[in-house]
Amino acid sequence: MQRRLAFLERGFLTLQKSMKAPIVEMRAITVKFPGVVANDNVSIDVYPGEILALLGENGAGKTTLMNVLYGLYRPDEGEILIRGESASISNPNDAIQLGIGMVHQHFMLIPPFTVAENIVLGIEPVNAGGKLDINKAIHDVEELSNQYGLIVDPKAKVENISVGMQQRVEILKALYRGAEVLILDEPTAVLTPQEVDELSAIMRGLVSQGKSIIFITHKLREVIAVSDRVTVLRQGKCVGTGETKNTTAEELAQMMVGRKVVLSLEKEPAQPGDTVLKVDDLHARGSRNLPALKGVSFDVKAGEIVGIAGIEGNGQSELVECLTGLRKATSGHIYVNGIDVLNNQPRTLIEQGVAHIPEDRQNRGLILDFTVAENFILRNYYRPPFAKGINLDYRKVHAYARELISEFDVRTPSENVLVRSLSGGNQQKVVVARELSGEPKLLIASQPTRGLDVGAIEFVHRRLLAQRDQGKAILLVSLELEEIMSLSDRILVIYEGQIVGEMTADKATEGELGFLMAGGRTKRGLLTEGSEESGQYRRRTQEPLKTSFSHIS
Amino acid sequence: MANTDEELRNPSKPPFRISREQAIELVIPVVAVLLALLIGALLILFIGKSPLVAYGALLKGAFGSKRDIAEMLINVTPLIFTGLSVAFSFKCGLFNIGAEGQFIMGQIVAAWIGFSLTGLPTVIHMPLAFLSGVLAGALWAALPGYLKAKLGVHEVINTIMMNYIALYFSHYLVMGVLKEPGPIPQTPPVQAAARLWRILPGTRLHFGLILALGAVWLIYYLLFKTTLGYEIRAVGINPHAARYGGINVSKDIVIAMSISGALAGAAGAVQALGVQFRFLDLFGFVGYGFDGIAVALLGRNHPFGVLIAATLFGTLARGAITMQSIAKIPKQIIGIIQATIVIIVAADEVLRRFLKSRGAATQALVEAGEVEGDGN
């Protein structure tokens, strides 16, 4: 408590010191939804030329507060002042008029339209005949893009550009409408680590030109890295505001979660047992029918976590899909407990004890319009005790659901609620609960903490480690290098459909892994120079053979 | 977090409180019907007639006498089946526009089995003829289902084409091998043993209504109480997640289309065995299959909703005839009313927003009371 007060005090002093008037003031905003107070007497200020991070767990009320500012919700109580004047914002058009722009977590772009067309949509420049003046649009976009250093190709179709690029289009869209205050809702959730770096550079550039940014996030690292000030929300209430440089990740985490959080994981050394999964020279094609896996071989033993590190799109998804029966491999072998299960149906693999936490929980892991209870039985509904002849015994289903809800601490009013209405973290708990409760032999966890907040991440990590300690074999695929490094016992690096390196986790460094992830295996010289610490790993390419070496810089 | 600790600790507390969303779902069809009747009334005024007289005649036509009620229910019966047919396919994420063709196949096959076999007792002949029609509809729908499952050919295209094939195939049969000797293109009459029982003395009301009500319950049970229903709904909402869960999506598509077709075939069978007692050459589509789409839409793809919607459409169709003969108001007005209902329900997002924004304040007050009651 004392620490929190100190933090508040520091924040207060900062405010007093600041001579500039805030551009946005939200005062004592209260928003009530059926059964919840989403924002309870929340106040924030945003000054010109600063990045304010709005930090909080999923469901803390960050997005609600910003939706109020953007005119999507009307507050039940409270006042909004823009440039010192009381403003009534009843729809996004009002907000845009006042110079407020919002980039939503899920982009609002039209894929077959070009970048320029998307940006000018709704306020298109027209020529004398009332026809869209596409050349002026392109010109305007180029100008804007140069001014703020947001490099885009105005003539490219949105469906053909990367997610990071799409985000820039969204930001340009807001700037084109004259935004002075930009609201970015979880902007890094969809980005690769490289794109995150680019985005923070863009954000810095924007504020240096006098724009203000409200940055909604639940990632502590990002708050520390880019924001000037931070406001922390918890359960709809504002629990603190202050300058970022005066606080620490630990302090923020504690305020956000409301209790002490252990940011680093303690784990016992692994006790690997028999080989549970053995993949041998696996080849498969990706969605565009191009080779995605080019001879992948590795194994996972009971009682260990093997992490697969790599940049998105290097074959991770295809590998996981082959291992779970969701994609046909073109050749190779997959042995689970010694049985070749290559190209078996998903159900056969489930029955072999393969559990799967899929990377896309909303599109694959869950049926959002099914209830929590119905989602729990997705992979075993057809077996007793749930199935009784042709019938589904809903009483047993509900009893089972209540058991899992309490065991995995899923926050839901009841098991009869649609999964859609749960927060992201609780949705993931439903998936994790379902997959772990089946007593799997092998657990394939693909991006198990994507989009989750600190509390939920901690929860998932602990569960994975507990599974490992119970002797389960775990294959962890993640784009978060930190996650791979802190959870895994062994780390494999995947690059362009091949495993290009393998090392034990205690010997791995971020530099080394990053180098391999970027395809550094062919430039051997660079590797020796580039890495900072010694590492032991085996080369897994065809020619250089499986030599293990260590190096010291 | 949306919940208090107390709620979390007592998850067994009866959650039977209809949410606002659910209430809106239920209200939309009702509002659609009322609005459509209002628009119909304005139209009737516009052509210089009295809406009261018109709607009075309509109600009299549908409920005025025992016979009227029976005729209305005869209209309702096939609509229940075809409405269920379309709704069931929707539940699996499929759009069976082919109920019309499956209806025709069910009708002609039921008539054929009904007239061609002789000497069977009713307890065998009647169910046999009925189930043959059901099976014919099922097979007629299974083919586009199979093409969808195996080759990914869209079921809308194929079922539309299958409608025409069914129509012309029925011409071919009724003009050829199944034709009764004589000048009229029709099959011989169905044997007495194959005809559906009359269930209301003095009227034409037949056992098909009971079968339809049974189908409503059966489909409800299938969808919401069985493992197959679980699978089919899973595939309908999210086929990717269903596949991940180990469900054989292709198999379920074929099964769902077959059941959908079986229901449409049942509609044809009850018309052949309960109303016409033969198959008469068709000049064009009868429309029960297409009306089934509207019924399913209005009934929110729920079996009980379908029952209510089919009753409404059947009432309107029956009442329209009296309205035209007694009140001298063109029965096309009813067509307009039906179309308006469909449009409003199909464009329900407009209505939903309207309903949500209205009374949001009242709702907030109610909820505020609850929120304060939570033991914080």
Image: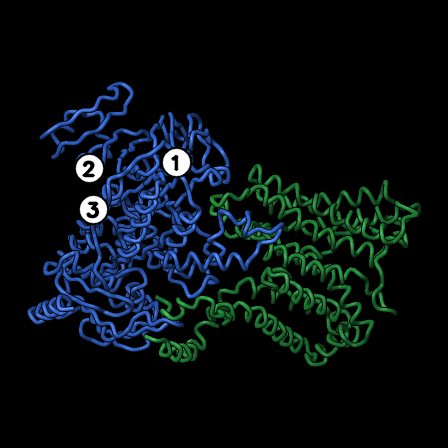
Chain colours: A blue, B green
Residue labelled with disc 1: A318
Q: CA distance from mark 1 to mark 3?
A: 27 Å
Residue A179 seen: no
Residue kind at label 2, given as amino acid type: Asp
The 10 Å Cα crowd at callout 1, few under 14, some 14 to 19, many 20 or more, is many
- Read off the chain for label 2: A
> Residue A198 has which mark?
3
Q: Residue at x 53, y 63 (%)?
A: B347
Residue A375 seen: yes
Q: CA distance from mark 3 to mark 2?
A: 30 Å
> Residue A506 has which mark?
2
Query: Closer to the camera, A136 or A64?
Result: A64
Q: At numbered mark 1, what does the secondary structure look like: helix, strand or loop? A: helix
Residue B94 in picture, x, y percent from top left: 58, 50
- Read off the chain for label 1: A
Q: Residue at x 42, y 56 (%)?
A: A404
Residue kind at label 1, given as amino acid type: Glu
Q: CA distance from mark 1 to mark 2?
A: 28 Å
Residue A513 in picture, x, y percent from top left: 21, 35
